[in-house]
Amino acid sequence: MAVPERRAKEIEAAVLPALSDFPFQERMVELIAAAGNSNTEYDLLELPSGDTPVDAVLEVSVLGVGLHKLEKALQIVTVVRAQLLEKDTGTPIVLQNLQHGWRAFGKKKPERGDVPLSREEIDGYLSVLSEDIVDMLLLMDDFSARFPALWGYEDLGLLPKYPKPKWSFFGKKFKAVTVDSLQPRLEWVPFPSPRNTAQDAEGRLNEIGPVLYDLRIWRIGAEEYQPVELVYERRGLADPWHAVEQPLEPGTSYYWAVRARFGHGGRTTVTRWTISFTGFFPLKDSLLTMRAGLYRFSTPQ
């Protein structure tokens, strides 16, 4: 059942003023600069067509922020134009127009006194969005981003092996599969997979350097469509599996995602984070991580 019209108007009245009062453009510029300056992986930047390092400028423009109707919720969507320019000439190296969805509001009416959308929450979301934009423009390219998983669903990135996703046709979402431990051994299909190799008609996968993996785990919050807290992260894993090194909370649901990183053309590049669009998110043109489509698991009691 869709969100009733009366509830939709209540959401709009509560949320839109907070969005209109927030300095999105100014804060995005600050956060983009911080993300770019804090990660040494971005130092090796080269033109896609050659081997010459370039001095580049990253520009971002917030084109709009508003509410988008999902099947059972209204979701805040930010439309952003991000481009990488050669500093001396202003020539665009990469240009992307992006739609990025985040906090969703459903049919349930908030309790009296609840703050529907705080400035701290907006700022936290923009930090995530800024990191995604910088990663996409400086660590992803047409080569690394073009390998969908294609496993019967509309997936991107590396497919989970354990816990194996279970689809709920009744709920139109992936179930939170219960793992066997508070420190589960998460596994995924290694990159490149046989399907990736079959897609690589030019044989460019033969040119990549050693493959490493990044892993992230988020605790799922009260809202169905959005993880709220990154609780675990590891970068540069050598194997397509990882035993979580610190106990997670018992009886708790989590999202998780992995991506591959490797050398290609003299620079570090990455694949997209693991994600499924099935049943979750309609804005399929965005190249950013749709956290609503992350796979999930639950820990035992």
Image (cartoon, helix red, strand yellow):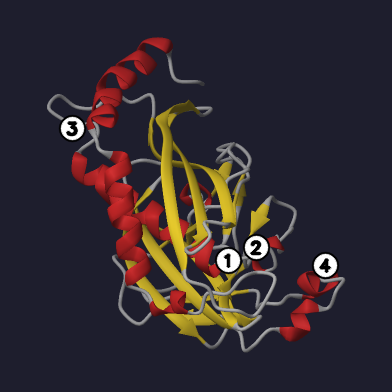
Q: Position of residue 176 (x, y in %)?
A: 48, 54
Task: Say which amino acid is labelled 2.
Answer: Ala
Disc 2 from disc 3: Cα separation: 38 Å
Disc 2 from disc 1: Cα separation: 6 Å
**Which of marks 3 and 4 precedes in the sequence?**
3
Disc 3 from disc 1: Cα separation: 37 Å
**Which of marks 1 and 2 precedes in the sequence?**
1
**Does the residue at mark 3 contact the one at mark 1 (Cβ under 8 Å)?**
no
Say what secondary structure mark 4 lies in.
Answer: helix
Disc 4 from disc 3: Cα separation: 48 Å
| 274 w.r.t. 215: above or below | above
Disc 4 target residue: 199
**Which of marks 4 and 1 precedes in the sequence?**
1
Task: Say which amino acid is labelled 3.
Answer: Val
Task: Say which amino acid is labelled 1.
Answer: Met
Q: Is residue 255 visible?
A: no
User: What residue do we see at 44% from left, 20% from top?
Assistant: 3
Disc 1 target residue: 140
**Does the residue at mark 4 contact the one at mark 3 (Cβ under 8 Å)?**
no
Q: Position of residue 290 (x, y in %)?
A: 51, 49
Q: Position of residue 38 (x, y in %)?
A: 32, 72
Disc 2 target residue: 145
Between circles 3 and 1, the one closer to the viewer is 1
**Which of marks 2 and 4 precedes in the sequence?**
2
Q: How many marks?
A: 4
Say what secondary structure mark 3 lies in.
Answer: loop
